[in-house]
Amino acid sequence: MFLHSDFDDTHRELFHTVQAWAKKTLAPGAAERDRDASFDEALYRRLDTELGLMNITLPESLGGSELDVAATILAIEALSEQDPGIAMSYLSQELLFAHQLYWSWHFSGRNMPERHKTILKNKWISGMAMTEPNAGTDVLGMSTTASRTEDGFVLNGVKQWITNGPVGKAFLVYARTGEARRDISLFMVEAGIPGFSCSECEHKMGMRSSPTGILTFQDCRIPETSLVAEFNGGLIPMIRNLAIERLGLAAQSCGIASTCFEEMRRYAIERHAFGKSIVEFGQIQRLLSESYASLLAMHTMLYTTIRQVMDNDPESSVNADAVKLFCATAAETISRNAIQILGANGYSTAYPVERLHRDSVLLSIGGGTNEALQKNISRQLIRRKEGLAWT
Ligand SMILES: Cc1cc2nc3c(=O)[nH]c(=O)nc-3n(C[C@H](O)[C@H](O)[C@H](O)COP(=O)(O)OP(=O)(O)OC[C@H]3O[C@@H](n4cnc5c(N)ncnc54)[C@H](O)[C@@H]3O)c2cc1C
C-alpha cells in the first residue's frame, strides 16, 4: 500500500510475493508458535526453498541473488506482518550473519577463507553475538576475550540474548582482543566445537517463535581463519552494519503496525454499538486516523532512509537511528490502539493484535534501546556546525 516510487519492479514483486506467502503460510500457525514458544525449523527453511530469501545480497557463487539490502528489508517487513518472530530469526541470519560476514570481507579487500564461503553457501542457521549479561547498551564494555595462541585464538566469556542461539550452527562473535576499550575483533565461530555451549534464555514476552540463547565460551579454541578481516578491527563491521540492522528492525515495526491497523479498521466498521458501527464514534475515528497517519510516516521514513543508507548519504546514520526510534514507538502505540478498538476481543488470543503488541515491545529494546537512540541522535545533532539543510 505504501511502497515507495523509488522501488523497482523487482522490489515490488518480491514484497508482494513474500506478503502473500506469509499470509497463506505463516499466519495459520503463528498463534500456536507464540503460545508454545516454538521455532519451526522446517517452516523457516521454506523461506529459502520456496521464496529464495537467503543470501539475498550475496553473489550467485555463494548461493545469493545479488539484490540490494532494500530487498532484504522489504522481505523482513512482509514476514513481520504475520509472524515477527520468524522474521527476527531471518533478520539475524540474513542481515547480522550472512550480509555482515560477506561484506566485511569484501570491504576489507582480503580473501574470504574457504570455510566461510562453504558456510554461507550452505545457508546454515546463524546469528550474531554482541550482547553479554553485563554489557548490552554499553557494548564496548564487553568482557568476552579472544587471546592469541600459536595457531589461532582462545575464546572465554558469555553472550546473552542471542537470536537463533539454540538452533544456529554458526555465529559472528565480537570479543575483546586488547586492553583499550575499542580493541574488539569479530570472529566466525561454528557451534558444537569443544568449549562452546548454548542454553535457552528465560521465557520471553514476545517474539516467542524465535529462539534466543546464551552462548558460553570456555577455553574454546578457534583457528586463525576464524578472524573476520582485521585484528582489533571489529568496530568497523559493527558500525557499518548498525544502520542496516536498525532499518531491518524498523521494518519489523512497520509490518506489525500494518497488520494491526488493518485489523482495527475492519473491526471498527463491522462492530456495532448503540445501533451503529463503532467507526462512527469520534474517539474511535481518532484512534484510527492517528494510527493511519503514523503508519504513513513510518513507511515514508523507512523507505527514504533505505535509499540514503544504500547511497552512503552522510545523514543516513542519524536518520536510521531516528527511523528505528520512531517506528518502534509508533508500532507499540498502533498495536495498543488496535487492542483498544477490538475491546475484549483485542485483549484475547482470538485476534492477533495482543500477540503483535507483545512482539512490538522488543523493537524498543533490541538492536539499540530507545534511550540509546535518543542519546545517539542528540549527540550527532549537537555535534553539527551547520543547521539542518532540508532542501
Ligand atoms: C529477543 C531478543 C533478541 C536479541 N537478539 C540479540 C542478538 O541476536 N545479538 C545480540 O548481540 N543481542 C541481542 N539482543 C540483545 C539486545 O540488543 C540488548 O538487550 C539491548 O542492546 C539492550 O541491552 P540490555 O538488555 O543489556 O539493557 P541495558 O543496556 O542494561 O539497559 C537497561 C536500561 O538502561 C538504559 N540505559 C543503558 N545505558 C543508558 C544510558 N547511557 N543512558 C540512558 N539509559 C541507558 C537502557 O535504555 C535500558 O532502558 C536481543 C535481545 C532480545 C530481548
Image: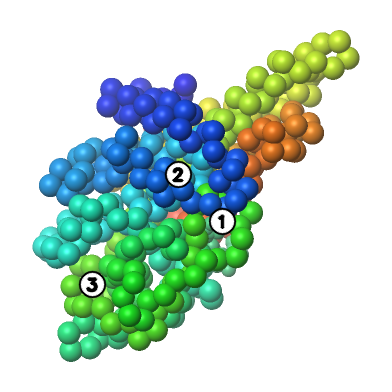
Q: Residues within 10 Å of mark 3 (few under 14, many from 20)?
A: many
Which residue in the protein does label 2 denote? 87
Q: Residues within 10 Å of mark 2 (few under 14, many from 20)?
A: many
Spatial separation of the CA atoms under disc 2 and disc 3: 28 Å
Q: Secondary structure at mark 2?
A: helix
Sequence order check, earlier mark of 2 and 3:
2
Q: Nearer the viewer, residue 283 or 94?
A: 94
Spatial separation of the CA atoms under disc 2 and disc 1: 16 Å
As drawn, 182 above or below 376 = below
Type of amino acid under label 2: Ala
Q: Which mark is residue 365?
A: 1
Can residue 288 be seen at all in this image of the molecule?
yes
Q: Residue at x 43, y 26 (%)?
A: 20
Which residue in the protein does label 3 denote? 227
Q: Nearer the viewer, residue 183 or 362?
A: 362
x and y, in percent, of residue 367 in the image:
47, 56
Can residue 376 be seen at all in this image of the molecule?
no
